[in-house]
Amino acid sequence: MKDYKLTLAQDLAQMSDFSIRHLTYTANDKTRINAEIIQTNPIVSVIVLNEHNELVILPTFQPAIGKWFYEVPFRAFNIREHVLQVAEGLVKKQTNLNLEDAVLLTQGLNQMDPRTDANMQVVFGRVQTFLNTPSNEVRFVNLKEAYYRLKRQIKYNNPFMDGLDLGGLSSDALRLYRFVEE
Protein backbone atom coordinates (compact mmCIF):
# COMPACT_ATOMS: atom_id res chain seq x y z
CA MET A 1 0.00 0.00 0.00
CA LYS A 2 1.15 3.49 -0.78
CA ASP A 3 1.89 5.88 2.06
CA TYR A 4 -0.29 8.97 1.51
CA LYS A 5 0.37 12.27 3.30
CA LEU A 6 -2.08 15.14 3.62
CA THR A 7 -0.74 17.89 1.34
CA LEU A 8 -3.72 20.26 1.08
CA ALA A 9 -6.69 21.03 3.31
CA GLN A 10 -9.09 23.76 2.26
CA ASP A 11 -12.37 24.78 3.94
CA LEU A 12 -15.27 24.98 1.49
CA ALA A 13 -18.00 25.79 4.05
CA GLN A 14 -18.04 26.33 7.81
CA MET A 15 -21.07 25.86 10.09
CA SER A 16 -21.38 25.61 13.86
CA ASP A 17 -21.50 21.79 14.01
CA PHE A 18 -19.59 20.84 10.87
CA SER A 19 -17.40 21.99 8.04
CA ILE A 20 -16.97 20.83 4.47
CA ARG A 21 -13.36 20.49 3.42
CA HIS A 22 -11.42 19.66 0.29
CA LEU A 23 -8.44 17.39 1.04
CA THR A 24 -5.58 16.25 -1.15
CA TYR A 25 -3.39 13.31 -0.16
CA THR A 26 -0.18 12.69 -2.07
CA ALA A 27 1.99 9.54 -2.18
CA ASN A 28 5.75 9.41 -2.66
CA ASP A 29 5.24 8.61 -6.36
CA LYS A 30 3.13 11.81 -6.68
CA THR A 31 -0.16 9.88 -6.98
CA ARG A 32 -2.95 12.07 -5.56
CA ILE A 33 -6.30 11.44 -3.96
CA ASN A 34 -8.71 14.38 -3.84
CA ALA A 35 -11.83 14.26 -1.67
CA GLU A 36 -14.49 16.47 -0.18
CA ILE A 37 -15.38 15.42 3.36
CA ILE A 38 -17.60 16.56 6.18
CA GLN A 39 -15.86 17.18 9.49
CA THR A 40 -18.24 17.19 12.45
CA ASN A 41 -18.41 17.52 16.16
CA PRO A 42 -18.81 14.12 17.85
CA ILE A 43 -22.29 12.60 17.69
CA VAL A 44 -24.02 10.63 20.42
CA SER A 45 -26.74 8.15 19.48
CA VAL A 46 -28.70 6.65 22.36
CA ILE A 47 -30.17 3.15 22.24
CA VAL A 48 -33.02 3.41 24.76
CA LEU A 49 -35.05 0.37 25.83
CA ASN A 50 -38.08 0.47 28.10
CA GLU A 51 -39.15 -2.12 30.66
CA HIS A 52 -40.76 -4.21 27.88
CA ASN A 53 -37.49 -4.37 25.88
CA GLU A 54 -38.91 -1.95 23.31
CA LEU A 55 -36.69 0.47 21.42
CA VAL A 56 -37.53 4.16 21.75
CA ILE A 57 -37.67 5.96 18.39
CA LEU A 58 -38.86 9.41 17.31
CA PRO A 59 -40.10 10.76 13.98
CA THR A 60 -37.46 13.24 12.78
CA PHE A 61 -37.48 15.46 9.68
CA GLN A 62 -34.21 15.31 7.74
CA PRO A 63 -33.91 18.61 5.79
CA ALA A 64 -31.03 17.37 3.59
CA ILE A 65 -33.31 14.71 2.12
CA GLY A 66 -36.66 16.43 2.69
CA LYS A 67 -38.23 13.38 4.34
CA TRP A 68 -39.29 12.11 7.74
CA PHE A 69 -37.45 9.17 9.32
CA TYR A 70 -37.51 7.38 12.63
CA GLU A 71 -34.41 8.00 14.70
CA VAL A 72 -33.12 7.06 18.11
CA PRO A 73 -32.28 10.15 20.17
CA PHE A 74 -29.06 11.69 18.79
CA ARG A 75 -27.22 14.98 18.51
CA ALA A 76 -23.81 16.48 17.93
CA PHE A 77 -22.01 17.62 21.05
CA ASN A 78 -18.92 19.54 22.07
CA ILE A 79 -15.90 17.42 23.04
CA ARG A 80 -15.74 19.26 26.37
CA GLU A 81 -19.16 17.84 27.32
CA HIS A 82 -19.41 14.49 29.11
CA VAL A 83 -21.06 12.02 26.72
CA LEU A 84 -23.22 10.25 29.35
CA GLN A 85 -24.57 13.56 30.65
CA VAL A 86 -25.30 14.62 27.08
CA ALA A 87 -27.16 11.34 26.49
CA GLU A 88 -29.23 11.68 29.69
CA GLY A 89 -30.18 15.29 28.91
CA LEU A 90 -30.95 14.45 25.29
CA VAL A 91 -33.29 11.59 26.18
CA LYS A 92 -35.08 13.71 28.79
CA LYS A 93 -35.51 16.62 26.38
CA GLN A 94 -36.66 14.56 23.38
CA THR A 95 -38.77 11.91 25.14
CA ASN A 96 -39.65 13.27 28.60
CA LEU A 97 -38.20 10.03 30.04
CA ASN A 98 -35.35 9.62 32.52
CA LEU A 99 -32.45 7.56 31.18
CA GLU A 100 -31.13 5.10 33.77
CA ASP A 101 -27.93 3.07 33.92
CA ALA A 102 -26.42 4.79 30.89
CA VAL A 103 -23.35 3.00 29.54
CA LEU A 104 -21.00 4.13 26.77
CA LEU A 105 -20.85 1.19 24.34
CA THR A 106 -18.71 2.47 21.48
CA GLN A 107 -16.57 5.43 20.70
CA GLY A 108 -14.49 6.42 17.76
CA LEU A 109 -14.82 7.07 14.09
CA ASN A 110 -18.00 5.98 12.33
CA GLN A 111 -16.35 3.84 9.68
CA MET A 112 -19.63 3.15 7.88
CA ASP A 113 -19.53 6.49 6.03
CA PRO A 114 -16.17 7.34 4.43
CA ARG A 115 -17.28 10.90 3.57
CA THR A 116 -17.28 12.05 7.16
CA ASP A 117 -14.91 11.96 10.08
CA ALA A 118 -17.86 11.69 12.48
CA ASN A 119 -16.82 10.44 15.88
CA MET A 120 -19.93 8.47 16.87
CA GLN A 121 -20.56 7.52 20.45
CA VAL A 122 -23.27 4.93 21.11
CA VAL A 123 -24.81 5.00 24.57
CA PHE A 124 -27.21 2.40 25.93
CA GLY A 125 -29.69 2.99 28.74
CA ARG A 126 -33.13 2.06 30.00
CA VAL A 127 -36.26 4.05 30.82
CA GLN A 128 -39.27 3.22 32.95
CA THR A 129 -42.40 4.35 31.13
CA PHE A 130 -44.60 3.50 34.11
CA LEU A 131 -42.75 6.16 36.13
CA ASN A 132 -42.84 8.90 33.50
CA THR A 133 -45.20 9.73 30.67
CA PRO A 134 -43.36 9.80 27.36
CA SER A 135 -43.87 12.70 24.99
CA ASN A 136 -46.55 12.20 22.33
CA GLU A 137 -43.96 11.75 19.58
CA VAL A 138 -42.25 8.73 21.15
CA ARG A 139 -42.84 5.40 19.42
CA PHE A 140 -41.88 1.98 20.74
CA VAL A 141 -40.90 -1.13 18.78
CA ASN A 142 -39.86 -4.47 20.26
CA LEU A 143 -36.09 -4.83 19.91
CA LYS A 144 -36.26 -8.15 18.03
CA GLU A 145 -38.94 -6.66 15.78
CA ALA A 146 -36.70 -3.61 15.20
CA TYR A 147 -33.89 -5.85 13.93
CA TYR A 148 -36.34 -7.69 11.67
CA ARG A 149 -37.74 -4.41 10.32
CA LEU A 150 -34.26 -2.97 9.76
CA LYS A 151 -33.24 -6.11 7.86
CA ARG A 152 -36.31 -5.77 5.61
CA GLN A 153 -35.57 -2.07 5.09
CA ILE A 154 -31.99 -2.82 4.05
CA LYS A 155 -32.68 -5.97 2.01
CA TYR A 156 -36.01 -5.13 0.34
CA ASN A 157 -36.28 -1.32 0.65
CA ASN A 158 -39.39 -1.73 2.85
CA PRO A 159 -40.25 1.12 5.21
CA PHE A 160 -39.16 0.49 8.78
CA MET A 161 -42.53 1.42 10.35
CA ASP A 162 -45.58 3.53 9.54
CA GLY A 163 -44.24 4.27 6.04
CA LEU A 164 -40.98 5.76 7.38
CA ASP A 165 -37.44 4.40 7.18
CA LEU A 166 -35.06 4.17 10.12
CA GLY A 167 -32.49 6.94 9.61
CA GLY A 168 -28.81 6.35 8.94
CA LEU A 169 -27.41 7.30 12.34
CA SER A 170 -30.02 5.12 14.04
CA SER A 171 -29.37 2.20 11.68
CA ASP A 172 -25.65 2.46 12.41
CA ALA A 173 -26.24 2.74 16.16
CA LEU A 174 -28.64 -0.22 16.24
CA ARG A 175 -26.22 -2.42 14.28
CA LEU A 176 -23.33 -1.40 16.53
CA TYR A 177 -25.44 -2.09 19.62
CA ARG A 178 -26.29 -5.57 18.35
CA PHE A 179 -22.65 -6.29 17.59
CA VAL A 180 -21.40 -5.09 20.98
CA GLU A 181 -24.18 -6.77 22.97
CA GLU A 182 -23.85 -10.28 21.43
Image (cartoon, grey):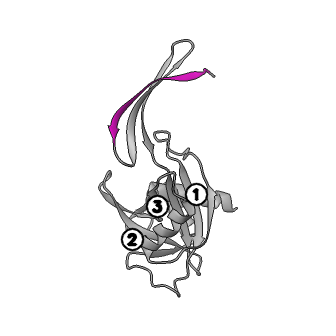
* Front position among marks 3 and 1: 3
- Front position in the image: 31 or 163: 31
Within the magenta stretch, is there residue 128? no
Q: Residue at x 29, y 55 (%)?
A: 66
> Is residue 175 in view from this perspective?
yes
In this rendering, position of residue 102 left or right of residue 169: right
In this rendering, position of residue 110 left or right of residue 1: left
Secondary structure beneath label 2: loop
Gap between marks 3 and 1, in whole Å? 15 Å
Provide the residue span drawn in magenta: 2-14
**Residue pointed to by mark 3:** 74
**Residue pointed to by mark 2:** 162
Q: Residues within 10 Å of mark 3 (few under 14, many from 20)?
A: many
Q: Residues within 10 Å of mark 1 (few under 14, many from 20)?
A: some
Gap between marks 2 and 1, in whole Å? 21 Å
* Front position among marks 2 and 1: 1
Residue farthest toward the right in the current orientation of the protein: 182
> Is residue 174 in view from this perspective?
no
The image quadrant of residue 82 is bottom right
User: Which of the marked residues, 2 or 3, is nearer the chain's N terminus?
Assistant: 3
**What amino acid does circle 1 point to?**
Arg
Q: Residues within 10 Å of mark 2 (few under 14, many from 20)?
A: few
Using the image, determine if residue 150 lies above or below residue 140: above
Q: Main secondary structure of the magenta part?
A: strand
**What amino acid does circle 3 point to?**
Phe
- Front position in the image: 90 or 141: 90
**What amino acid does circle 2 point to?**
Asp
**Residue pointed to by mark 1:** 175
Please identify the quadrant where the C terminus is shown.
bottom right
Using the image, determine if residue 169 lies above or below residue 125: above
Please identify the quadrant where the N terminus is shown.
top right
